[in-house]
Image: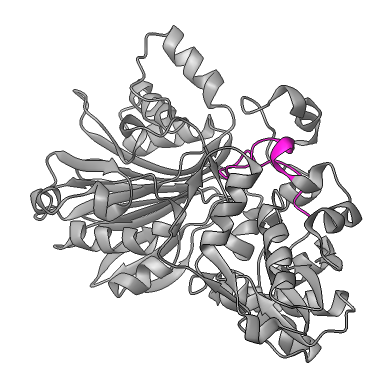
Amino acid sequence: MYDIRGLNEECGVFGIFNHPQASELTYIALHSLQHRGQEGAGIVCSNGEFLFGARGMGLLTEALSKEQMMSLDTFPHAIGHVRYATTGGSELSNVQPFLFKSHKGDLGLAHNGNLVNALSIREALEDDGAIFQTSSDSEVLAHLIRKNKSPDKKQRIKTALRQLKGAFAFVILDEDSLTIALDDHGVRPLMLGMVDDAYCVASETCAFTAIGADYIRDIEPGELITLNEQGIEFDHYTDVSKPNLCSMEYIYFARADSEFRSTSTYTIRKSLGQQLAREMDIDADIVIGVPDSSLAAAKGFSEASGVPQEQGLIKNRYVGRTFISKGQEARERAVRMKLSPVRDVVEGKRVIVIDDSIVRGTTSRFIVKALKKAGAKEVHMGVSSPPLKNPCFYGIDVSTHAEIIASAKSTEEIRDEIGADSLTYLSVDAMHDVYYSYGSKGQCDACFTGNYPIEIIDRLLPQEKDLKTKGV
C-alpha cells in the first residue's frame, strides 16, 4: 500500500508522573499528537504497584474505547504512544506502549525513532534464549534492561541504552518511576513540561498546550531523566552528544504551533519561505501554499517577495490519510480527492506554488496540471526545502532511493516531469542559516545531502551499501 503524501510521520510519545488524571491527560495529549501516527495507539498506566495497559489499531478514538479509558482512570502515572510503522508490521502486537511482565517487575515502554542495530542485538539475544513477542525494533531495549544483572535500576537502563545505535526517544514506565531518554544525536524531538506540579514529556509542545501544561525546555541529546516520588533527577547515559535534530521536523512533521527551543515551527517555516523568495527570482501575480504544512512558508515568501498571497488550493479535510492501491493513476485520483484549485483566484494569473517537499512528484504533478486546467497562465513551483534525495533510516518511512524522484533526476528533469514552468528548491546552506538563526544546535540533513550522522548497520539495504562509510 502507498500513501499519496509519500512522506510519513514517525510516532508520538507522551508520559506523565504523579497526576490524579494521568490517563485522561495522556489521552488528550495523544490526540494532539495524532498527526505523528494513525495506525495504532495505546496507554500504559501504573498505580505504584503494578502496570495496566490498553491499545488498539487505528486512530486514537478507534483504538481506545470509553470502557478501556475508564479502567485506567485511577492510575497516577502513565505513558502513551501513537504509531506509524517504520519498522515492524502494521499489526496489534506492534502497537505501543509495550507492557512486559516479569518476576523483576512490570515494564512499559514507548519509542519514537528507529534503531539501526536492532537486528544484530535481537539475533544475539535470541541466541541467548530471549523470545520476542513483536517484530518492532523497540522491543530490544526491554530485553537488554531485563537481561542486565545490576541491582541499580538506572544503571541497568544506562547500560542498555549505550548498546543502542540510531534515533530514539524513549519513555519507560515501571511501578514507581518514569524514565525518559533521548539518543546522543537528538534526532527525534522530545520536550519536558509541567502541569499541576506534575512533570510530563512529549514529542511536541502542542501536547502541552492541549493539557494546559507549561513547556519547560527541550530534552538534550544523551540525556536521561528520572521521575519518581522523590521528584526529578537529571542525568546523562553517555558523555557524547552531537545535536542532529531531524530537519524535516521543522519543515513538515511537527505541528505549526509546536516549538523547538522556544520557537514555533510556524515562525521557522515562514523564515524558510522568506529565504526561498531570496533565491527564487520569478515574476508572478500571486503565491499560494499547498495546505496545510506549506501555508506558513508561502506567507513568508509573500512577505519577502511582495507577491500577494492567495488561497488558490482548497484541502478536503474529510478525506484523511488516503491509502491507495499501487499505480500512478490511482495515486492521482487520490490527490484529486484532497486538493482542488480555486478558479477565480488562479485564472489568468502567473502563479507561484510553495510546497514543503517533493518526494515522488505525484502531488506536484497534479497541482500544476489542475492549476493550468483552472486557467493559470504560468505555474512556478517553489520548494521550501532542498531536494530530498536520500532515504531515511532514523524513523521516516522513506527507505529506498526508488521512492524519491530527486535521487535519480535533476531539478530540470523534475520540472519537466511535473509540468511546471520553473522549479526552485531552497539551498541546503539557506535552510541551515534559518535553523541556526533560531538557536538550533545542529540538524540531520541526510535526506538532502547523504551525510548520515549515525552509522547505518542493520537497516542497510543492498542498494544503499555505499552509505555505510558515511556514518560517524
Toward the viewer: 181 or 375? 375
Report the residue at 13% width, 50% height from top. Answer: 72
Residue 314 locus on image (x, y percent): 55, 74
Query: How many numbered circles does the render carry?
Result: 0
Q: Quadrant of residue 374?
A: bottom right
Residue 193 locus on image (x, y percent): 37, 67
Q: Find the magenta span and give its range.
A: 387-404
Residue 228 sits above or below residue 293 on the image: above
Report the residue at 86% width, 68% height from top. Answer: 421
Residue 6 in view in this figure:
no
Residue 328 in view in this figure:
yes
Report the residue at 36% width, 21% height from top. Answer: 147
Toward the viewer: 381 or 125? 381
Prevalent SS, magenta region: loop
Residue 458 locus on image (x, y percent): 61, 24
Magenta stretch holds residue 152: no
